[in-house]
Image (spheres, grey):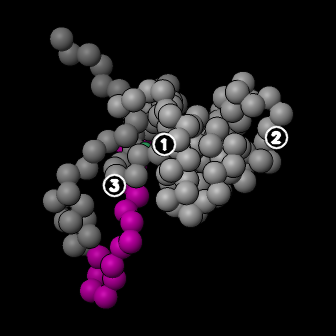
């Protein structure tokens, strides 16, 4: 995956989603795509500020809300923790490492997701499944 993102590619993704590609939206989206460590809004603000020193936290929040509403970024919530942001739009689970606080993407096989949908009572259909694990990294065994 490319680490440096062409501004034109970002612009296209924003316009494809029906969004006006403002410089603020572009820089917020770029920062989220560049380092996929599920940052909080404060962390995103700090990263964006180094590229666009005049931007305000309120503007960053507005951009995040717009990106989430238009399906370009998803919110990840854990109990008693600030919302984090994830640009991985494939259905996946999260592992929240309680020791380091890091959040990792976990691929979930499609057949497992289908099985999970199967546990719903008749008449219900899930539009999304949010799966998260919490724990510690297992000690090295080698
Ligand atoms: Zn994720």
Kindly report the distance in space between the C-alpha atoms of the residues bearing marks 1 and 3: 23 Å
Label 2 beta carbon within 8 A of ligand 1: no
Would you identify the image quadrant in which residue 116 lies?
bottom left
Kindly report the distance in space between the C-alpha atoms of the residues bearing marks 3 and 2: 32 Å
Label 1 beta carbon within 8 A of ligand 1: no
Q: Where residue 9 is drawn, which disc sits there?
A: 1
From the image, state whether disc 3 or disc 2 is nearer to you: 2
Q: Main secondary structure of the magenta part?
A: loop
Q: x, y (%) of residue 8? A: 53, 41
Q: x, y (%) of residue 6? A: 50, 34
Q: Crowdedness of circle 1 by 10 Å Cα count: few (<14), some, many (20+)?
A: few
Residue assigned mark 2: 56
Of pointers 1 and 3, the one earlier in the residue sequence: 1
Kindly report the distance in space between the C-alpha atoms of the residues bearing marks 2 and 1: 25 Å
Q: Where residue 114 is drawn, which disc sits there?
A: none
> Above or below — where is 20 with respect to 98?
below
From the image, state whether disc 2 or disc 1 is nearer to you: 1
């Amino acid at each position: 995956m490319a680490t440096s993102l062409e501004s034109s590619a970002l612009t296209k993704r924003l316009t494809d989603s029906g969004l006006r590609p403002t410089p603020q939206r572009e820089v917020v989206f770029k920062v989220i795509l560049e380092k996929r460590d599920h940052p909080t809004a404060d962390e995103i603000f700090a990263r964006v500020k180094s590229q666009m020193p005049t931007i305000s936290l309120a503007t960053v929040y507005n951009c995040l809300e717009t990106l989430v509403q238009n399906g370009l970024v998803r919110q990840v919530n854990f109990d008693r923790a600030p919302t984090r942001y994830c640009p991985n739009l494939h259905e996946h689970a999260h592992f929240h490492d309680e020791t380091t606080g890091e959040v990792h993407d976990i691929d979930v096989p499609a057949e497992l997701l289908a099985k999970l949908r199967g546990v719903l009572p008749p008449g219900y259909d899930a539009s999304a499944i949010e799966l998260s694990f919490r724990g510690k990294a297992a000690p090295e065994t080698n």
